[in-house]
Image (spheres, coloured by chain):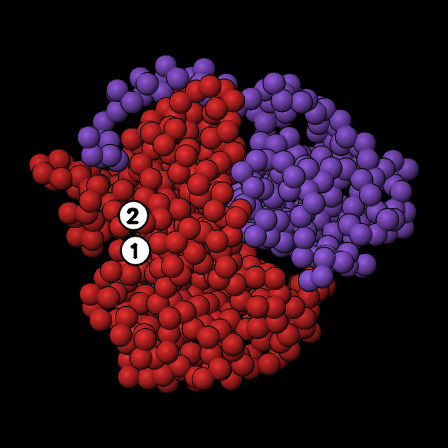
Chain colours: A red, B purple
């Protein structure tokens, strides 16, 4: 083929409005998702300029970061959170933007509801003032997180100034071993490439392992691309993608659907397309993973030990490891299995879809959490919550001693009242184990829903393969 | 019109930790304001103050020896969340530039959008700067945006840094991205009407 192109290049090229010499590209944005935390200052900017939102039909809003997960029908107790959510309601009203906020049957985490409602589609450009916008890449969309100044650019013009990033192909081949799921794949990749290894790149995930994953599992992979510094991650659309999308609320319908599918089939990278970098992994090397440190790159196979200081490549890595372990209250060379745990959190845009809850339920069914464990599940959306109840998962969780809450970002970042107390250990299905991420002094260990469920039962870090 | 930046001459605050993420720069619980101002008081909140809100003595921002408009930080500064509040907090506190050997992408563009200069230099040069400051906390550095040069006063360091040409121009002249994009509005509308294969929204 002449001039073979990558999936990324095809979408990028189709969205460049113009590019002047020495200027970044003016990139057209198909869908702009907004939430309460990173949008208010952008709306204030529009008001100051006395300009409207340029394309309201391409802008969608929800409230997720600040919302309580208990008693969502009551006014938000915390004053600043309430004010921020109210500001979103007012801004959406003033600027005529559809808002699926608290109380709406479609409310949920912005990156859960986009795909769920069929807003997310292949071939699109999607932005949101949130780094986990990369989630939408699982549909073969070019999706990335932006700052608030850029949110204002998109609200004002439906375009954004961007330099083209480099591309990286990450290939994973082979059949996954028992007990290994999407979260383990991405934690493994990040542990190999480090928390900064993807910076400057847009990633495309390929290979038989990725193709074999469900769409929701692919979202988990793309979601965490940012945790290795990559601007985004994407996976070419295929029949599974089309099947998952068909019939959703805002999906293309009728005879347009066939045309859309025909176009989407042209998107996968051409044979011979060039990437700036290629990394290849074997599924057989991947095992259930858990993090021990304070960035998502500090993860190990669950049966392994925490690395020793003397084996660190250089002084700065040694220093970082020492500092992380001091914060985590863990020791070099220590085994992860058997480590005491206080909290188990299921949720976040990484792992709060129905399939994640089904995974957890598989292990929790007929079992009970350890007495000392505080465990809660926060669905990614109100629709996920309804589906979980429909499938009877709520009963399994309740019998296991779990609390099933309302939808939101919750303890992934502790902006609402769901926080992990200082010094306590939490095995979390979320995406970041930074210092204080789940609350000041909280100690986070990232893992899959299977590992989190197994750990909840025993009360210590546990290999999920003991239960499946 | 934004304020213009051309040259910064200042002492530095050294923070050699690597992978300083935006949750450290400004923890999530302080993101609830709806304005851009006032984040400086919570900059590095959990490293700066203990649970009783008492300043933690050995944290660099609480050490009167080190002051200045330039933060010098270990590699991969600003990783994690896309919150522009991190850049706002640094600016509100009084920083005008951050020097590091590597920046996270989104932080870098957020910084540039707030005229906070992300100055990327080699790891060796970065370590040299830490040594100079250790020896002499009063050493001043000059960031010359026009010439794209970072140099130390009285110490042997002068190095060129890269910055994207467009952003350099806007920062030096106080130009605004949105005005530029709005000047392209006709092209955007043409793009919309000439577009093929737009299945992004169901009309």
The residue under the point 39% across, 17% down is B185
Residue A106, percent from left and from top: 28, 49
Reply above or below: A96 against A370: above
The residue under the point 60% across, 81% down is A334
Can residue B108 be seen in this snapshot? Answer: yes
Between circles 1 and 2, the one closer to the viewer is 2
Tell whether label 2 touches label 1 (CB within 8 Å). yes
Q: What chain does badge 2 belong to? A: A
Say whether residue A178 is left or right of residue B202. Answer: right
Q: Which residue is mark 1?
A: A382
Reply above or below: A446 against A242: below
Q: What chain does badge 1 belong to? A: A
Quadrant occupied by the C terminus of chain A: bottom left
Task: Judge the density around disc 1: few (<14), some (14-19), many (≥20) Cα neighbours within 10 Å.
Answer: many
Q: Are marks 1 and 2 on the same chain?
A: yes
The residue under the point 56% across, 52% down is B29
Q: Quadrant of residue A377?
A: bottom left
Residue A217, percent from left and from top: 31, 60
Q: Which residue is mark 2?
A: A104
Q: Whole-Å distance between the Cαs marked 1 and 2?
A: 8 Å
């Amino acid at each position: 083929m002449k001039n073979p192109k990558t999936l990324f290049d095809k979408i990028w090229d189709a969205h460049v409005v113009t590019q002047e010499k020495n200027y970044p590209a003016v990139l057209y944005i198909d869908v702009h998702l907004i939430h309460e935390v990173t949008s208010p200052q952008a709306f204030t900017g529009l008001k100051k300029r006395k300009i409207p939102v340029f394309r309201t039909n391409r802008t969608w809003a929800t409230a997720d970061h600040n919302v309580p997960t208990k008693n969502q029908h009551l006014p938000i107790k915390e004053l600043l959170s309430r004010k921020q959510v109210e500001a979103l309601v007012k801004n959406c009203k003033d600027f005529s933007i559809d808002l699926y906020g608290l109380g709406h049957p479609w409310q949920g985490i912005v990156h859960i509801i986009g795909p769920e409602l069929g807003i997310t589609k292949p071939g699109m450009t999607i932005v949101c003032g949130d780094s986990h916008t990369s989630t939408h890449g699982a549909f073969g969309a070019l999706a990335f997180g932006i700052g608030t100044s850029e949110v204002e650019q998109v609200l004002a013009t439906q375009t954004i100034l961007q330099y083209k990033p480099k591309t990286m192909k990450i290939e994973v081949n082979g059949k996954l071993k028992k007990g290994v799921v999407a979260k383990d794949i991405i934690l493994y990749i990040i542990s190999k490439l480090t928390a900064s290894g993807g910076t400057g790149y847009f990633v495309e995930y390929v290979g038989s392992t990725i193709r074999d994953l469900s769409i929701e599992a692919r979202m988990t992979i793309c979601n965490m691309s940012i945790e290795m510094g990559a601007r985004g991650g994407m996976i070419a659309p295929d029949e599974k993608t089309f099947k998952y999308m068909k019939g959703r609320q805002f999906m293309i319908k009728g005879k347009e659907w066939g045309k859309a599918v025909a176009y989407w089939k042209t998107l996968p990278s051409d044979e011979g397309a060039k990437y700036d970098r290629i990394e290849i992994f074997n599924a057989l090397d991947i095992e259930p993973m858990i993090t021990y440190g304070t960035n998502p790159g500090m993860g190990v196979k669950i049966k392994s030990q925490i690395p020793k200081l003397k084996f660190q490549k250089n002084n700065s890595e040694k220093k970082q490891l020492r500092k992380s372990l001091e914060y985590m209250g863990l020791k070099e060379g220590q085994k992860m299995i058997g480590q005491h745990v206080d909290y188990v959190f299921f949720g976040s845009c990484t792992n709060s879809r129905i399939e994640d809850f089904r995974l957890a339920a598989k292990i929790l069914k007929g079992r009970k959490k350890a007495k000392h464990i505080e465990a809660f599940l926060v669905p990614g959306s109100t629709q996920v919550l309804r589906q979980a109840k429909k499938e009877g998962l709520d009963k399994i969780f309740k019998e296991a001693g779990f609390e099933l809450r309302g939808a939101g970002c919750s303890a992934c970042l502790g902006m609402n009242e769901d926080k992990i107390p200082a010094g306590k250990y939490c095995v979390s299905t979320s995406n970041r184990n930074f210092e204080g991420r789940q609350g000041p002094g909280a100690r986070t260990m990232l893992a899959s829903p299977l590992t989190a469920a197994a750990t909840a039962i025993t009360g210590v870090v546990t290999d999920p393969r003991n239960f499946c | 019109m934004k304020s213009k930046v051309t040259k910064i001459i200042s002492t530095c605050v050294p923070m050699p930790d690597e992978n300083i993420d935006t949750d450290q720069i400004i923890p999530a619980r302080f993101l609830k304001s709806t304005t851009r101002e006032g984040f400086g008081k919570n900059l590095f909140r959990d490293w700066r103050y203990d649970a009783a809100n008492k300043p933690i003595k050995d944290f660099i921002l609480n050490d009167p020896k080190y002051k200045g408009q330039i933060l010098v930080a270990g590699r991969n500064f600003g990783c994690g969340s896309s919150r522009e509040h991190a850049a706002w907090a640094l600016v509100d506190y009084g920083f005008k530039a951050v020097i590091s050997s590597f920046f996270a992408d989104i932080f870098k563009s957020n910084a540039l959008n707030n005229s906070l200069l992300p100055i990327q230099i080699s790891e060796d040069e970065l370590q040299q700067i830490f040594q100079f400051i250790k020896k002499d906390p009063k050493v001043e550095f000059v960031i010359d945006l026009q010439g794209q040069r970072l140099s130390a006063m009285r110490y042997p360091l002068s190095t060129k840094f890269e910055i994207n040409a467009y952003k350099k121009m806007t920062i030096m002249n106080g130009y605004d991205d949105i005005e530029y994009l709005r000047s392209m509005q006709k092209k955007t509308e043409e793009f919309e009407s000439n577009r093929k294969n737009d299945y992004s929204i169901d009309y």
